[in-house]
C-alpha cells in the first residue's frame, strides 16, 4: 500500500533519481525517458509550462492545483494504474474531489507517488474516456462536472418534504450584521497588533489581557455605573461561557425569571443546579418571592427583561440587593443589551449598589457581533479565585488579538460612536414596527420599554400557535412567548410574539413587517375592527 501527500513539482527534489521501475506488463510504454507529445495519451492535456501556474489564478475552481496538498492512497489489487484509477474514483465519489477541481500535472503526481509518469498519464486518459475527468489544452486535467449523481442509490432514497423557504429573519436578540464597524475595527486591529508586547503572543493570563481589563473597568464605570478594579474582571467568550464558569462555583438553587432563555436554564441544570421561577410582571421579577424559593443565587436581566421587555423597578432593585446582603446571596446580573435604551438614558447596572454581592456580565454579542465571542464578568473579590480555578490556567479564553483590538476600539472612542449610531438605527426600526402595528393591527399591543433589539406583540388569548403557523407560511422566522416560559412557573401563560428587529437588512425591513402583519390574528369577534385595517391581513377581501 502506498500513501502520499502530493505537493507541487517544486517539492520534489530535482536530484531524485528517475523512476524506471516497470509496473505490470503493458503499463509502461517503451520510452519513459521523456514526456514527449507522443507520451501524452489522447484526451489528456499535456503538461505545458502554462499548465503549472505558480499560484491559483482568478477563476480557478476551489480545490487542488499545483501548489496545494493532495492526498491519495494506493491500495488493493491490480496494477499501479488500476490502483491509481480506483483511488481517484473514490475521492471523486466521496466528494473529496469536487467537480471542477484541478488535478496535479501527471509528471508532478508521478514523482510524488514514485511511479512511472506514463502510468499516471494512462490513468488520467482512461478516466477522461470514462467521463470522470476532463482535459483541455492550457487548462489541465479536472474533475468532470457531472449532470447525474455518482451514487445511483441516492435517487432511490425518499425525498424529504421541502421546508418552506425562509424569507425574513425576525428572531430576537440578533444585531444588524451589516452594521458592524469594519473600517474602525480594522484600524484598531492594526494599532493593537503593532503595539502588542511580545508576551501577548505567549501563554496568557486566564483573567484576560490586562489592556482589555483596564479599559473595561474605565468604560463600565463611565457608561454603566459599574464599580470595579481590573483584577476583578475575567474575560470570557460570552454570557453562556460566563454562566458555565459560575455553574462550577454556585451551589443549591438559582432563582430565575419565569420568562427567559431555556438555554441558560439548561446550562445551570447541567451544572447540577436547580432553577426556581420568579413571577415577572410589568415591574420585572417579583423579588418578594425570593425567600420562598430557598435560592442562594438569583439570575436577573434588570435593565431590559428578556423577553417581556420591562426594566426592574427601582424598589425591586433595592430589594434584591437587600436580600443578597441579608441572606449571603448573590445576584447574577445579565446586562446583555443595557446600552440600548431609546426613550431615555440607559438605566445603570445594579452592580453599582453592592459590588460585593453582584456578578455583572456583559458581552459584545448585541453591541458589536456575536461572531467576536467576547464577554466579561465583573466579580466580587471573594469569587475571583474560585472562578479562575474553574476556568483553568489555559485554553478556555478568547483570542488575545481580539481582546487587544477591543481594548483599542473602546479606548479610541470608536465603541461609543458605534453605540450612538446603533441606538438611532434600532430606535427607527422599533418605531417603524410600532407604527405599522398601530395602523394595521390596533388590537395588538407592542409591550415593553423602547430598548434592546426586540419587542413583544401581545396577542389575544389562544392565538399564539395560529400566528406562528401563519408566520411560517409567510416565510418568517420568529418566536412565541410560550417558548420562553419556565416549565415550573405557575403564572398563567401569555400569548405573544417576540419580534427581533435587528437582523433584516434595511432594504427588506419594510417587507418583513408587511409579512408580519399578514400573519397576525384577527381581533376577537366582540372587538370592533377599524375600517382602515379590514382586508389588510391574511388575504381577506375588503368587506
Image: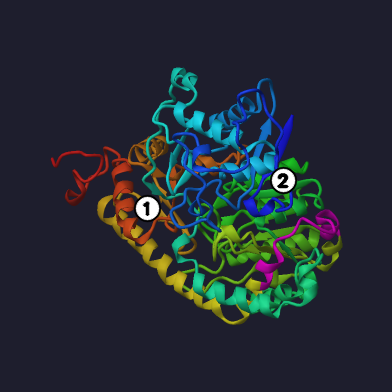
Determine whether the residue tagged by mark 1 lies in a helix, strand or loop.
Answer: strand
Q: Is residue 482 magenta?
A: no
Q: Earlier in the sequence, mark 2 or mark 1?
A: 2
Between residues 125 and 417, which one lies in front from this camera angle?
A: 125
Tag 2 residue: 268
Q: Is residue 304 above or below residue 209?
A: above
In the rendered structure, the answer to whether residue 70 lies left or right of residue 492 reads: right
Mark 2 burial class by Cα count in 10 Å: few <14, some 14-19, many 20+: many
Res 176 visible: no
Could you say which quadrant of the image residue 287 lies in? Answer: bottom right
In the rendered structure, the answer to whether residue 300 lies left or right of residue 423 reads: right
Task: Tally the numbered discs.
Answer: 2
Determine whether the residue tagged by mark 2 lies in a helix, strand or loop.
Answer: helix
Point out residue 277 in the picture as x, y percentages from the top left corner.
64, 45
Could you say which quadrant of the image residue 393 lies in? Answer: bottom right
Tag 1 residue: 445
Between residues 427 and 128, which one lies in front from this camera angle?
A: 128
Give the quarter of the figure containing the C terminus: top left
Q: Which residues are magenta?
A: 386-404
Give the quarter of the figure containing the N terminus: top right
Amino acid at each position: 500500500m502506498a500513501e502520499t501527500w502530493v505537493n507541487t513539482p517544486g517539492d520534489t527534489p530535482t536530484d531524485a533519481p528517475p523512476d524506471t521501475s516497470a509496473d505490470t506488463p503493458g503499463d509502461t510504454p517503451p520510452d519513459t525517458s521523456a514526456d514527449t507529445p507522443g507520451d501524452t495519451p489522447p484526451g489528456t492535456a499535456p503538461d505545458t509550462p502554462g499548465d503549472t501556474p505558480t499560484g491559483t489564478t482568478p477563476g480557478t475552481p476551489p480545490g487542488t492545483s499545483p501548489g496545494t496538498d493532495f492526498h491519495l492512497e494506493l491500495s488493493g489489487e491490480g496494477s499501479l494504474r488500476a490502483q491509481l484509477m480506483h483511488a481517484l474514483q473514490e475521492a471523486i465519489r466521496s466528494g473529496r474531489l469536487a467537480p471542477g477541481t484541478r488535478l496535479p500535472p501527471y509528471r508532478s503526481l508521478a514523482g510524488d507517488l514514485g511511479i512511472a509518469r506514463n502510468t499516471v498519464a494512462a490513468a488520467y486518459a482512461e478516466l477522461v474516456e470514462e467521463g470522470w475527468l476532463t482535459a483541455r489544452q492550457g487548462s489541465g486535467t479536472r474533475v468532470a462536472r457531472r449532470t447525474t449523481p455518482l451514487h445511483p442509490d441516492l435517487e432511490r432514497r425518499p425525498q424529504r418534504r421541502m421546508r418552506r423557504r425562509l424569507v425574513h429573519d425576525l428572531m430576537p436578540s440578533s444585531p444588524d450584521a451589516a452594521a458592524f464597524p469594519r473600517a474602525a475595527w480594522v484600524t484598531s486591529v492594526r494599532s493593537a497588533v503593532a503595539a502588542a508586547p511580545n508576551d501577548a503572543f505567549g501563554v496568557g493570563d486566564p483573567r484576560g489581557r490586562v489592556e482589555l481589563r483596564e479599559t473595561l473597568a474605565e468604560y463600565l464605570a463611565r457608561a454603566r455605573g459599574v464599580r470595579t478594579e481590573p483584577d476583578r474582571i475575567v474575560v470570557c467568550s460570552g454570557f453562556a461561557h460566563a454562566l458555565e464558569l459560575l455553574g462550577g462555583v454556585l451551589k443549591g438553587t438559582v432563582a430565575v425569571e419565569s420568562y427567559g432563555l431555556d438555554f441558560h436554564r439548561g446550562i445551570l441544570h447541567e451544572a447540577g443546579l436547580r432553577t426556581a421561577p420568579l413571577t415577572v410582571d410589568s415591574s420585572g421579577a417579583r423579588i418578594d418571592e425570593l425567600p420562598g424559593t430557598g435560592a442562594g443565587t438569583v439570575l436577573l436581566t434588570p435593565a431590559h427583561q428578556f423577553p417581556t421587555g420591562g426594566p426592574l423597578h427601582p424598589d425591586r432593585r433595592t430589594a434584591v440587593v437587600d436580600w443578597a446582603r441579608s441572606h449571603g446571596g448573590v445576584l447574577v446580573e445579565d446586562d446583555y443589551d443595557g446600552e440600548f435604551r431609546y426613550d431615555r438614558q440607559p438605566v445603570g447596572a445594579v452592580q453599582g449598589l453592592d459590588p460585593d454581592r453582584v456578578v455583572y456580565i456583559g458581552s459584545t454579542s448585541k453591541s458589536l457581533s456575536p461572531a467576536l465571542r467576547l464577554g466579561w464578568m465583573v466579580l466580587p473579590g471573594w469569587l475571583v479565585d474560585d472562578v479562575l480555578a474553574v476556568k483553568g490556567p489555559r485554553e478556555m479564553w478568547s483570542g488575545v488579538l481580539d481582546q487587544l483590538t477591543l481594548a483599542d476600539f473602546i479606548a479610541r472612542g470608536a465603541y461609543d460612536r458605534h453605540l450612538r449610531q446603533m441606538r438611532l438605527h434600532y430606535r427607527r426600526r422599533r418605531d417603524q414596527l410600532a407604527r405599522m402595528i398601530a395602523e394595521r393591527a390596533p388590537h395588538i399591543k407592542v409591550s415593553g420599554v423602547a430598548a434592546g433589539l426586540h419587542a413583544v406583540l401581545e396577542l389575544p388569548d389562544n392565538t399564539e400557535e395560529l400566528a406562528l403557523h401563519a408566520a411560517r407560511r409567510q416565510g418568517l422566522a420568529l418566536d412565541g412567548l410560550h417558548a420562553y416560559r419556565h416549565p415550573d412557573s405557575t403564572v398563567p401563560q401569555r400569548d405573544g410574539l417576540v419580534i427581533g428587529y435587528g437582523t433584516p437588512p434595511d432594504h427588506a425591513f419594510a417587507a418583513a413587517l408587511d409579512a408580519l402583519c399578514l400573519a397576525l390574528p384577527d381581533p376577537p369577534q366582540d372587538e370592533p375592527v377599524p375600517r382602515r385595517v379590514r382586508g389588510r391581513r391574511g388575504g381577506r377581501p375588503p368587506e
